[in-house]
Amino acid sequence: MSDTNLPVLIAGGGPVGLALAVELGLRDIPCTLVEKRDGKLTVPRMSQVSTRGMEFCRRWGIAEEVRNAVWTNTHTLDFVYLTSLTGDEIARLKVPSYQERGPLDYTPEGPCHCPQIYFDPILAELAGSFPSVTLRYNTALESFEQEGETIHAHLVDSVTGATETV
């Protein structure tokens, strides 16, 4: 077991943890993000980045990449209800493409259909581009305790079982 001093430890490598790592990286604040999984998503999760989330993406310089991660600007975003995948169409909710939608009058960015399976890798690449940010996948936060103004966090390597206190 080793003792390491970390100014900021972020537990969780989803959109919120990665967004925090990006914000700290922009400010050159040293931080380490731990995620118990390998960072690859295998089950469906979030399907849309909200307007506010896209405003953050714009500020971080990744809005266009997020918008184009799955579909082009001209791809229709309709919701279609069918009796089965090969069956009859019951109803269709028309949603204009980003190009058809045009600019919104209240924000430079609108919501974006970008499933988390595509969104997380974009955020992880950005977060990892900052020298002050360390991303540690396959590392779980097992427990922590506070001693005065110090936090002791107990980490476990999800692959080897090795432990570490930071």
Image (cartoon, rainbow, N blue to C red):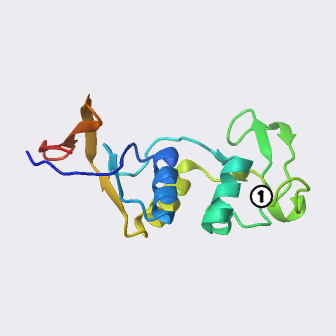
Kindly identify the residue that appears in the image at 58 percent across and 42 percent down. 46
Q: Nearer the viewer, residue 127 or 73?
A: 127
Image quadrant where residue 47 sits: top right
Q: Residue furthest right?
A: 105
Answer with left or right where residue 135 lies relative to residue 65: left
Q: Position of residue 28 (x, y in %)?
A: 44, 65
**Farthest left residue in view:** 1
Q: Is residue 21 left or right of residue 154?
A: right
Residue 131: x and y in percent read 37, 70
Q: Nearer the viewer, residue 32 or 128?
A: 32
Rendered residue at 13%/46% (across/down): 160
Kindly identify the residue that appears in the image at 32 percent across and 48 percent down: 34
Q: Which residue bears the numbered disc 1?
A: 109
Q: Residues within 10 Å of mark 1 (few under 14, many from 20)?
A: some
Q: Looking at the picture, does residue 154 appear above or below residue 77?
A: above
Which image quarter: residue 155? top left
- Above or below, comparing residue 145 to residue 155 in the picture: above
Q: Position of residue 87 (x, y in %)?
A: 74, 38
Where's the N terminus, which quadrant?
A: top left
Total tally of numbered discs in the picture? 1
Q: Is 106 situated left or right of 8 in this image?
A: right
Point out residue 158 in the picture as x, y percentages from the top left corner: 21, 43
Instruction: Inspect the image, locate mark 1, and give the three-letter code of the amino acid beneath it.
Output: Glu
Quadrant into which the C terminus falls: top left
Q: Quadrant of residue 55?
A: bottom right
